[in-house]
Amino acid sequence: PYPGPDNLMLGLIGLASDSTAQKRDEEARARHAAILDLTSDFIVTIDPAGQLSYLNHAAREALALGPEEPAPRSLSEYFTEGAAAVLLREAIPAVLNTGRWNGESEWRSRTGHVIPVSQIILAHPGPLGNVEFLSIVARDITVSKAAERAVHRSEERFQTLSAAAPLGIFLTDATGLRTYHTSRWMQIAGLSLDASLGTGWVNAIPPDDPQSPVPPPPPNVAPAQGWCPPP
């Protein structure tokens, strides 16, 4: 109101400002928040001291926290003891020094469930160049870790069975270089370990063997000299 004599209102005074930029910024923040909550990756922000400030929806689900449930600020609540120690003593100092760190870690839910993750930690500087906060982006690698363990167990079984087999077993790669052998094969071949390295295993195969995978030597090479396939 614009008062006049005797406090009679003479009119109104209004102020206006362009809020286009503010609305654009608010819409951008809303889009970013929606993306963070829809991604399956775990996203966390922490201050330089390692205190939690944000968890996205996927991280809350993984840690068994409700959507509106207050989250503990200490990182030790979200990682196994060993992983938290690496984070605080190695990862965060490295990020503050170089701007980033990546590696594997182990998250721990409130129910005690351990989740192996591959994660990257980034530093986010403010206008003056000082680090304002850090972000952690982690991906659940439970399936790939289980596959690695299955492959390892399979390799152990193969080596156990092949070591007990009465037959000699050896393997090569596509170029003919030996990659594996059993001790029984060494006995049958009559070769030392050094002599069987690379393509040395071909010296255990008679050059006139019709089932030999090795091409016959050229006429100017005597069989007694040994013959290896050309590279």
Image: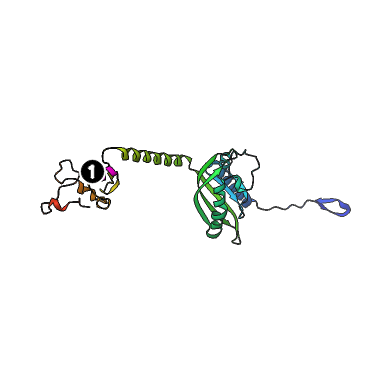
Crowding at dot 1, Cα within 10 Å, few <14 / some 14-19 / many 20+, comes out as few
Q: Which residues are magenta?
A: 181-189
In reply to whether residue 184 is colored magenta, the answer given is yes
Foreground residue among 194 and 132: 194
- Residue 48 locus on image (x, y percent): 60, 55
Q: Main secondary structure of the magenta part?
A: helix
Q: In this figure, which residue is indicated by the disc labeled 1?
A: 188
User: Horizontally, is 57 left or right of 143 in the view?
Assistant: right
Secondary structure at numbered mark 1? helix
* Relative height, residue 169 to residue 102 (above, below): above
List the single residue furthest toward the right.
6
Q: Amino acid at mark 1?
A: Ile
Q: Is residue 13 magenta?
A: no
| x and y percentages locating residue 114 in the rendered image | 54, 41
Residue 210 placement (x, y as % from top left): 15, 41
Furthest residue toward left:
219
Q: Using the rendered view, name the quadrant where residue 123 is placed.
A: bottom right
Q: In the depicted view, which residue is nearer to us: 50 or 69?
A: 50
Residue 124 position, x and y percent, is 57, 55
